[in-house]
Image (cartoon, grey):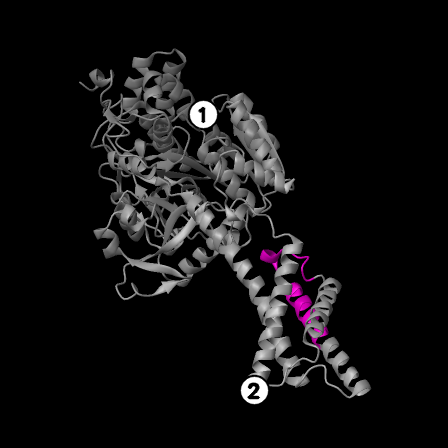
Amino acid sequence: MKFRSFKNRIYSGDNLMNLTDIRYLPRWVVLAIDVFFVLVAIFFSCYVVEKLTFSTQQVFYGENAMYLLILGISLLSMFVFRTYAGIIRHSTFIDLFKLFMATFCTTVAVAAISFSYYLITGQRLIYMLIPFSAIFFTTSFILLFIFRLTVKEFFHYAREFRRSAQRQRIWVLGIDEQAVAVARAVLDNPNLPYHIAGFLTERHDSSRASLLGKPIYSKERLEKSSKEELMVEGILIVKEMMTKEELNRWVAFFLEKDLKVYKAPSLQQLRNNDPDASIQSLQIEDLLNRKPIKIENKEIKSRHSGKIILVTGGAGSIGSEIVRQVVQFQPSLIIVLDQAETPLHEMELEMRDSHPNVNFKFVLADISNRHRLEPLFQKYQFSMVYHAAAYKHVPLIEENPHESILVNVLGSKNLALLSSKYGVNRFVMISTDKAVNPTNVMGASKRTAELFVQALQNREGNSTKFITTRFGNVLGSNGSVIPHFKKQIEKGGPITITHPDIVRYFMTIPEACELVLQAGTMGQGGEIFVFDMGEPVKILDLAQRMIKLSGFEPDTDIKIIYTGLRPGEKLYEELLTDGARTMPTHHEKIMISRDADLPYHEIDSLTNTIVKAALRRDKVDVVRNLKAIVPEFISNNSVYEALDR
């Protein structure tokens, strides 16, 4: 079959024969080569003995017979130890030991026969037996070993050459221990489609050195050369070893040189050949992420361990992450409430699969329906309520303002009043930076909810601590800009941006939720906690970088078009209202905003009025009442601008 396959390849017109396609050398070929090397060892040993003794006397008595004798014994030893049976390119120490034993036994047997013949006849079969035996043993073993080593290395390099031709040639950024360890792990993992072709550093004293047999290139050389000249397609970075500023600086440089940027998985995954240990393209989220937040787990655990927790909007982006983080502190029961059926079902499947030993209850309910909520508060003595349920999409809410009142205002009011009535220890409401100097109905409705929750704190007889947390956009949340841009890029564009100067704050979902848990623990009631959102990001810059990270050129491969500000949208978001003061807390990422508030009886009356307008579906009256409650609410690019005049 093998001969027929080989013949077919010759006569089928395909004359390309890859050496790595050869599965293994036939056993008879290995045996023939071994015999040849034994003959070489015999001739060499005879030659050396003759030269060492300066004698013209033949080393062998009965020369041809002795050659045949040694070859015969060698063949017998090879058959006994099966030195020819293994696949040479996969030789191990066991194969080396078998080779050693076969050569040793051959030498001992030949020496024993020669010595016995001398004792019987008085004639020497081999002149200078001991030197000859030592030289023959050493030479034959070395030749047979080198043959196997050469074949093994040849196949290794042929295989590596073939793989490197099929893989992407990448460099590793850095020459420190971590970078070298990652490179070694990639080289040792045959499942990865990447070939480490070198290392990149900012240092100038390493250009003549090498690591793992790979050259070291300076940043200066990369600046002066193209990727085609250096034969490199991408750069592998160890993201955890760099600050955000370093990462952004390097990525900007690589994108300018039209290089792909990859991030390495953990070393443990690479070393264990973990199937999930994939080298991935760098994502825009990696550039926007900040250093991990240190939270006081001890205090947070005491607030949740063994307690009953309610999370509203628990199937949404923020609510689901709060559930994932709270579950780590071993509460006695987590009730996950949401009105979206399918996401709630998916959340149930995820939680029951990942935490089978934790008690969950998944409730399908609308928070605007107090009669649906109150039985839950009656039955379960909630210790903590995390209120993340809300309508949040600005354009949709601008068209349906009455719906935002029913959920964002009435729903929040229902939950807050029930929490106070049934003695919930802490009520934590998730608000938004759009509630600050709002220009849209959504932001104004959230500000109204903030005012009600603040006022309820000081209501007579209340024992619940009402805490509000306020932050900006979160990366990867449902409907956020980054997943939207990714879908547009996958479709080939264009990317749509409302305005070239629009900017936004960004925070990761886990980071935001960690701060929510921290603020909920440290709050004493009535505070609005504002999170440090870092530097604002220009959306145009965000889109251009996402296009480049995807391997395209902005405005050439993927067009960017401007659609104009949507109703209620503003160019930049704020975290503090006009005239508000901030106070620091013991956590560097969390501040307290001192916003103006309203007496409880006043905000209660105002919210009752606006809810009645919402139930009548009177959009204009709803917005007019919102502007009365939130005087700083000035509509922007909206049909409700007339109400401001």
In the figure, is residue 213 to the left or right of 638?
Answer: right
* Residue 312 can be seen in this image: yes
**In x, y percent, where is residue 10?**
53, 38
In the picture, measured across the screen, residue 19 lies left or right of residue 568, that is: right
487 falls in the magenta region: no
Q: Name which of mark 2 and mark 1 comes first in the sequence.
A: 2
Give the image location of residue 274, x and y in percent: 55, 48
- Which mark is drawn over residue 411? 1
> Residue drawn 35% across and 38% down?
470
Residue 155: image x %, image y %? 52, 54
Q: Is residue 464 visible?
A: no
- Dominant secondary-structure state across the stretch colored magenta: helix
Residue shown at 62% from the left, 71% from the top: 140
Q: Which residues are magenta?
A: 83-107
Q: Are marks 2 and 1 in contact (CB under 8 Å)?
A: no
Give the amino acid at mark 1: Gly
The answer to which quarter of the image holds residue 458 is top left
Of circles 2 and 1, the one toward us is 2
**Which quadrant: the C terminus?**
top left
The quadrant in which residue 341 appears is top right
Circle 1 sits in a helix, a strand or a loop, which is it? helix
Give the position of the N terminus as an image quadrant.
top right
Coordinates of residue 154 in the picture (x, y in percent): 51, 57
